[in-house]
């Protein structure tokens, strides 16, 4: 199934809107910039945002002799993307599916996409611990090179949901690479004072308590917000930003 | 509304459909006999039960958003508090239908409370005299407990919440949902339509990623013939405490959406 994929990385968070898709896309872009061949699979069936973030909306998937051919961001085909959005007629179409249908779709995504050889396959997930997650975990359990990154924001509600996600990973036996804290503090574009909109440091202390690696904190950066829709790596566009530092280091720690 | 059992083959036409048990996909399905007999296509008896249970609830409102983290739960709690504070004689209930990520107990400051089961059903937790809450959060042992449930189990829980919670007389029941357009939403709508559902409030933030999902949510409402009571734009601007300059997202986007 994923025989030619060297590493699979799941991006998870219990809470919605904490930046899973931003982290998934920036991680994929950073790895691509570092010279790897990367696949990005979006299993958020009801709210796919990867195609929008990478500026790939309106593209469609076609069936090749060996399965679905992903949509490539670049001519060199170093970053391939698969998302349900490529199968919808209009970007506004809702996918009103109950669990079993979602499960079948995700199985197809895992089995029928022809990724070729990949150094990394990044999987962006919807919030929660339900059908999509259970299915992907069940199918990836046999894939030894699979691990998860947990994304949180500093607020207590988000931290609590990540604790649930840790329990989930433990129960399903997927190793956790570490925790990223996103939207930690706000850099004002006017005076560049950094304000903690929400309290900060929660992700770090959670990592300590849970004995997990802390992968860094990404501030709210309007420039990063604006990259959504363009498909550009922060490490390339703003190499000096805190965000680029975190993703650069993360990519390096994944190097093998 | 069609429903597809967990053990059905991929192309199951849905147990409520006319082809149930007779379609080509049904060959070999373990449910074929029940489906072919028409037993499965009868309306769920819970619908009638819920209608009776909620007959003392005047307005039932669903709070939706496609995108996660846009502040649905915060908006729900503010709306609940606002309605309850307006008139002490008015009773407001909040049902947290986010089974995998319940946040109402924390947002409303009643975490760690217990729900009691009496002869007339589960009694909700009272936040104030006239604001009550029911959430799966009250049924979990520890904050680390994860509810790792597939759709059918979540649906069962929502059915139970709707049919077994003893809200008493309510002027408003606000149902907070998880992000998306899946099991929880379909079940809530399916069970509440019979009992008379006033409509839905859709919450969004100004970013395009969030608006994208909200459009899907509005289409979802249209498909299910659910009235969209309004769109709430949350977190539209941030005022820097240092220089007092406010930074907006594209603040007027949500208004345009509303007109469509
Ligand atoms: N570090 C950041 N700086 C500025 N904006 C950010 C940052 N991280 C995320 N955002 C913005 O926050 C919003 C939510 O992010 P994103 O879509 O990545 O979250 P998500 O966890 O994937 O949400 P969902 O649970 O709905 O899938 C987006 O508009 C995104 O552009
Ligand atoms: S027999 Fe019933 S459950 Fe099975 S596929 Fe047919 S309709 Fe679906
Ligand atoms: Mg996302
Ligand atoms: Zn400022």
Image (spheres, coloured by chain):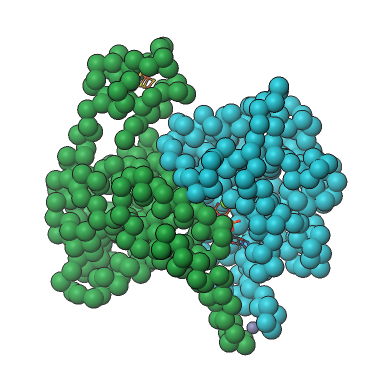
Q: Nearer the viewer, residue A13 or A54?
A: A54
Asked if residue B113 shows in the view, the reply is: no
The spot of residue B237 in percent (x, y) is 53, 75
Q: Position of residue A148 (x, y in %)?
A: 65, 44
| Figure colour of chain A | cyan
Q: Along the horizontal axis of the image, is A70 left or right of A154?
A: right
Q: Is residue B240 above or below residue B98?
A: below
If the image is split into quadrants, where does the N terminus of chain A sit?
top right
Is A57 above or below relative to B256?
above
The C terminus of chain A: image quadrant: top right
Q: How many marks?
A: 0
In the image, B37: left or right of B255?
left
Kindly indicate which chain is depicted in green in the rendered structure.
B
Q: Residue furthest bottom?
A: B243
In this rendering, position of residue A255 left or right of residue B256: right
User: Along the line of sight, which residue is nearer the eye, A181 or B118?
Assistant: A181
| Residue at figure coordinates x 75%, y 67% from the top left | A242
Query: Residue B109, percent across and down?
Result: 37, 67
Give the camera-side residue of B39 and B104. B39
Residue plotted at (49% across, 35% down):
A102
Q: Picture quarter containing residue A245?
A: bottom right
Query: Which residue is the extreme one toward the top?
Result: B28
At 64% from the left and 61% from the top, the residue drawn is A181
On the image, the x and y values in percent for residue B242 come to 62, 86
Q: In the image as oriented, which residue stretches furthest toward the front? A: B260
Q: Is residue B76 above or below residue A3?
A: below
Q: Nearer the viewer, residue A31 or A148?
A: A31
The vertical placement of A151 against B52, above or below, is below
């Amino acid at each position: 199934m994923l025989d030619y994929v060297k590493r699979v990385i799941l991006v998870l968070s219990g809470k919605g809107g904490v930046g899973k898709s931003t982290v998934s896309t920036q991680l994929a872009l950073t790895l691509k910039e570092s010279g790897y061949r990367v696949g990005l699979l979006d299993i958020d069936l009801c709210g796919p945002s990867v195609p929008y973030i990478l500026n790939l909306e309106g593209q469609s998937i076609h069936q090749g002799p060996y399965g679905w051919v992903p949509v490539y961001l670049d001519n060199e085909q170093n970053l391939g993307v698969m998302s349900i959005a490529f199968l919808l007629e209009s970007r506004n179409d809702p996918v009103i599916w109950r669990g079993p249908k979602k499960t079948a779709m995700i199985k197809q995504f895992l089995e029928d996409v022809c990724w070729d050889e990949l150094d990394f396959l990044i999987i962006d997930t919807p919030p929660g611990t339900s059908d999509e997650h259970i299915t992907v975990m069940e199918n990836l359990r046999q894939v030894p090179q699979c691990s998860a990154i947990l994304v949180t924001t500093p607020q207590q509600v988000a931290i609590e949901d990540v604790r649930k996600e840790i329990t989930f990973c433990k129960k399903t036996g997927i190793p956790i690479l570490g925790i990223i804290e996103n939207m930690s503090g706000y850099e004002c574009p006017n005076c560049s004072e950094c304000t903690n909109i929400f309290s900060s440091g929660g992700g770090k202390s959670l990592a300590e308590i849970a004995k997990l690696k802390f992968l860094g904190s990404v501030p709210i950066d309007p420039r990063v917000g604006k990259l959504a829709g363009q498909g550009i790596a922060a490490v390339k566009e703003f190499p000096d930003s805190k965000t680029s530092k975190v993703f650069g280091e993360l990519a390096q720690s994944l190097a093998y | 509304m069609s429903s597809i059992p967990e053990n059905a083959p991929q192309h199951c036409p849905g147990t409520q459909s006319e082809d149930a048990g007779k379609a080509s996909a049904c060959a070999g399905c373990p449910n074929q006999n029940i489906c072919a007999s028409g037993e499965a296509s009868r309306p769920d008896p819970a619908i009638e039960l819920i209608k009776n249970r909620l007959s003392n609830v005047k307005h039932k409102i669903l709070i939706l958003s496609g995108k996660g983290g846009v502040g649905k739960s915060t908006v729900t709690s503010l709306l609940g508090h606002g309605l309850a504070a307006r008139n002490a004689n008015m009773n407001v209930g909040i049902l947290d239908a986010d089974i995998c990520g319940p946040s109402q107990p924390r947002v409303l400051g009643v975490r760690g409370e217990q729900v009691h089961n009496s002869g007339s059903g589960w009694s909700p937790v009272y936040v104030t005299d006239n604001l009550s809450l029911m959430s799966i959060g009250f049924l979990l042992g520890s904050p680390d407990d994860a509810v790792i449930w597939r759709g059918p189990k979540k649906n069962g829980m929502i059915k139970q919440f709707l049919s077994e919670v003893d809200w008493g007389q309510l002027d408003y029941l606000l149902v907070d949902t998880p992000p998306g357009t899946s099991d929880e939403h379909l079940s809530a709508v399916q069970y509440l339509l019979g009992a008379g559902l006033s409509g839905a409030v859709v919450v969004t933030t100004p970013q395009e990623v969030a608006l994208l999902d909200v459009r899907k949510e509005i289409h979802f409402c249209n498909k299910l013939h659910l009235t969209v009571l309004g769109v709430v734009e949350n977190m539209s601007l941030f005022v820097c405490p240092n220089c007092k300059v406010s930074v907006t997202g594209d603040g007027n986007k949500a208004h345009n959406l509303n007109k469509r």
